[in-house]
Image (spheres, grey):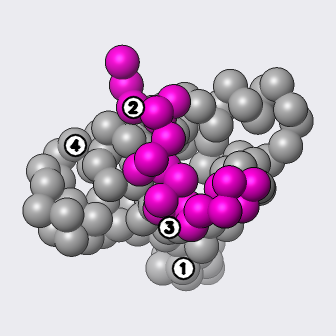
């Protein structure tokens, strides 16, 4: 019984490998870079309390795995400073400047690794 419950739960969990693969293919980029980004400890900690939809939106807002890694670092710091949930914070900041999440991420100089 326990194994079947576990299998059922896993069936409904977000497949990060598939998400990384799909994003890499969409952008014609390396899958390994995306997999490393979504399986990195920082992303795992940040996304632990997000819904699957929020995680997908966060990943799909990034034009590269490097942007995702920078966004995660940015959101970690801003979340600690403000106490606002990461996805809510990202949405609020994009809305404040009148941009979509994708445009906010790709056009935000703070999200490019220096």
Q: Which residues are magenta?
A: 94-114
Checking the image for residue 56, the label placed there is: 3
Q: Is residue 97 visible?
A: yes
Which dot, 3 or 2, sits closer to the camera?
2
Q: Is residue 35 visible?
A: no
Which dot, 4 or 2, sits closer to the camera?
2
Determine the residue located farthest toward the top in the rendered image. 114
Q: Measure how far apart labels 1 and 4 are at the Cα level.
A: 25 Å
Q: Is residue 4 left or right of residue 107?
A: right
Residue identified by numbered label 1: 12
Q: Earlier in the sequence, mark 4 or mark 3?
A: 4
Tag 2 secondary structure = loop
Q: Is residue 77 left or right of residue 32?
A: right
Which dot, 1 or 4, sits closer to the camera?
4
Tag 4 secondary structure = helix
Checking the image for residue 112, the label placed there is: 2
User: Within the image, what quadrant is residue 78 found in?
Assistant: top right
Q: Earlier in the sequence, mark 1 or mark 3?
A: 1
Relative image position of residue 4 (x, y in whole percent)? 54, 80
Residue identified by numbered label 4: 33
**Which quadrant is the N terminus positioned in?**
bottom right
Residue 20 belongs to magenta span: no
Q: Earlier in the sequence, mark 3 or mark 2?
A: 3
Mark 1 closeness class: few <14, some 14–19, many ≥20 residues within 10 Å: few
Q: Measure how far apart labels 2 and 1 are at the Cα level.
A: 33 Å
């Amino acid at each position: 019984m326990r194994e079947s419950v576990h299998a059922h739960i896993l069936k409904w969990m977000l497949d990060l490998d598939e998400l990384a693969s799909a994003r890499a293919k969409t952008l014609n980029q390396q899958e390994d870079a995306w997999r490393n980004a979504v399986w990195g400890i920082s992303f795992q900690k940040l996304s632990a309390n997000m819904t699957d939809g929020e995680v997908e939106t966060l990943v799909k807002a990034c034009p590269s795995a490097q942007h995702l890694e920078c966004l995660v670092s940015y959101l970690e710091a801003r979340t600690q400073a403000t106490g606002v949930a990461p996805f809510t914070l990202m949405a609020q900041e994009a809305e404040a400047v009148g941009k979509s999440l994708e445009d906010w991420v790709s056009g935000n100089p703070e999200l490019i690794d220096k």
